[in-house]
Image (spheres, coloured by chain):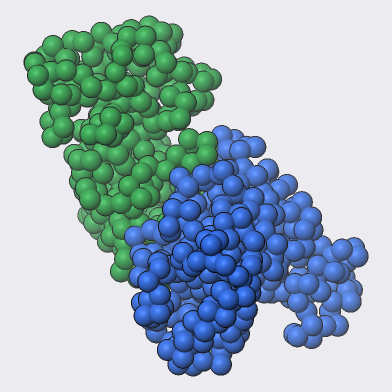
Chain colours: A green, B blue
């Protein structure tokens, strides 16, 4: 019997469930439509059924632990707390609810911490003790690893680099404050920067023709790749702000590497080249050349499930 | 025979050496004039002699370990590296040099990390696993503790919160860059802010009469205590910038407490009251009420030696 864990990635629309062995092979994978279950009890039942089905599909396996990555997940409490993009409001004791179905360990953390765990166990951070994963999606999530452990802090909510304030009285943030990093550096942040540049510059650009639904980070990346100066400036401004956040994170915890992950990181060198250049310009002398800026070592499609599964392996000492 | 450690606090002018038992009693204390020893070999010999003398004075004791707090100290390498305020230039392998005289463990870290260690073992952070010490002296030093361990990072130089950039293209910093926190929040930072306020405001103030040598953080604190509006504004601006740094640090590692220490923290409520108020205003909702802003639990005069000694106790599992 092969030992496996179940990795569950909870998103606002879908939850992806994978059965994963120690070598990062996803033996079976399935989905549950999160938004179809406004009552979380029914959701847990549906996920349980999906796990059972996937375990059968995976063959001769024994389930060792379940790991869950979820927005606003709290590792200490096994809860999802006030997640704005999920159908369930308030504090959801998800681990406790799963434990009605399972005797094996069930652990939960936020999605960026799960991504960091995946990077450490299966990805580019194997063997590293100090690194940070930044997920550049709709928002900016972060998973911080220090001395080989994900940092949860006193509250269990540590690792909110996306909500460090980089511009006091700056752009409105979904958290109710202003000037948080994720409003500048994320797939949505670069779109806001594009609008700022439309205001600042007079240069023509095909991007100006696009409406709200079409002006995406992907459209900006495509325009930049074909030499559009305004789109290139949007990447430059984004990179400069990201570099500042990286340099300040290095002053704090001096990691060996920063992994960039998620939609905006897909732009590749359009983002990585100026980020590395600005980091090199801005970093304190004692840290010069000590931190690598790297793409994730995990395939985008599998990373969330692998991260959640890695959390489960880590929990049982695997 | 009572077990003791030696704590050495290396400053630019003097090094203070204390013989300390497990209960934070300084059994004997002595000094060596750092600046009188441009050759570090002679310095180590002088400190060795001082330790021997102090051990005799302390009575029936056995030395278990030596802990050293020094500017730009690197824990991993046992070195002092490019410390601008010390007479020795370049990289000084201090632990190695002490080991010629001692068979017991000799460990070294920077002074703010030593302060954090002292706070954890002897001071206000007893029993805490996640906290940060900010030392507000000539510069701003920081010691970060996560999961009960001082954070050294990949390089050994982690914990440079004083060199996080809070104002891009802001005030010149001794590190060669601009806008680092310590140029705003420190004993010298508040003096620079006072000059900024002299420029911004027309109000009269007795502080305007003071020359460079008299306009100190202490003079500003005294003026503020007697109701000088410009001095009060200097504390307000300093507190607002410090609160921003605290709020961003909380987003990063979610500590249970932030300890403020050193010259500027001596101003007491003049600083603590507005810092707490601004932190409460600026902090992200999920962290509200989770972090205490506290004065150090150690007496200013003894803290550095106790911190260095705590480092030694920690090293030998004490």
Q: Examine the image and state in which quarter residue A277 appears.
A: bottom left
Residue at (37, 9) in percent of width and height:
A100
Where residue B169 appears, x then y in whole percent?
A: 53, 70
Q: Examine the image and state in which quarter residue A116 appears.
A: top left
Left or right, A2 with respect to B40, comes to left
Q: Nearer the viewer, residue A39 or B162?
A: B162
Q: Examine the image and state in which quarter residue B100 appears.
A: bottom left
Residue A80 visible in the snapshot: no
Picture mark count? 0
Where residue A114 appears, x then y in whole percent?
A: 32, 35
Q: Nearer the viewer, residue A222 or B263?
A: B263
Where residue A13 appears, x then y in whole percent?
A: 34, 21
Left or right, B195 with respect to B135, comes to right
Residue at (46, 91) in percent of width and height:
B42
For residue B268, above or below residue B13: above
Left or right, B238 with respect to A116, comes to right
Residue at (21, 19) in percent of width and height:
A63
């Amino acid at each position: 019997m092969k030992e496996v864990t179940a990795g569950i990635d909870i998103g606002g629309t879908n939850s992806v469930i994978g059965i994963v062995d120690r070598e990062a092979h996803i033996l079976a994978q399935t989905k549950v439509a999160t938004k179809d279950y406004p009552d979380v009890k029914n959701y847990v039942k549906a996920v349980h059924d999906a796990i059972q089905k996937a375990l059968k599909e995976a063959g001769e396996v024994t389930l060792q632990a379940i790991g869950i990555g979820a927005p606003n997940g709290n590792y200490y409490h096994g809860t999802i707390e006030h997640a704005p993009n999920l159908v369930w409001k308030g504090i959801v004791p998800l681990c406790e609810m799963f434990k009605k179905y399972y005797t094996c360990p069930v652990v939960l953390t936020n999605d960026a911490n799960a991504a960091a765990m995946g990077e450490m166990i299966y990805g580019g951070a194997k063997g590293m003790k100090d690194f940070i994963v930044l997920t550049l999606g709709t928002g900016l999530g972060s998973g911080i690893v220090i001395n080989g452990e994900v940092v949860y802090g006193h509250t269990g909510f540590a690792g909110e680099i996306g909500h460090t304030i980089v511009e006091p009285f700056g752009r409105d943030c979904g958290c109710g404050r202003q000037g948080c990093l994720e409003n500048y550096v994320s797939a949505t942040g670069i779109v806001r920067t594009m609008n700022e540049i439309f205001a600042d510059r007079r240069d023509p650009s095909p991007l100006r023709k696009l409406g709200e639904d079409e002006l995406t980070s992907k459209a900006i990346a495509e325009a930049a790749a074909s030499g559009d100066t305004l789109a290139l400036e949007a990447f430059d401004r984004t990179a400069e702000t990201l570099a500042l956040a990286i340099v300040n994170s290095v002053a704090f915890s001096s990691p060996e590497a920063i992994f960039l992950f998620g939609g905006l990181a897909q732009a590749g060198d359009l983002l990585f080249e100026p980020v590395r250049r600005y980091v090199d310009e801005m970093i304190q002398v004692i840290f010069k050349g000590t931190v690598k800026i790297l793409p994730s070592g995990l395939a985008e499609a599998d990373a969330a499930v692998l991260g959640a599964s890695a959390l489960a392996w880590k929990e049982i000492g695997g």
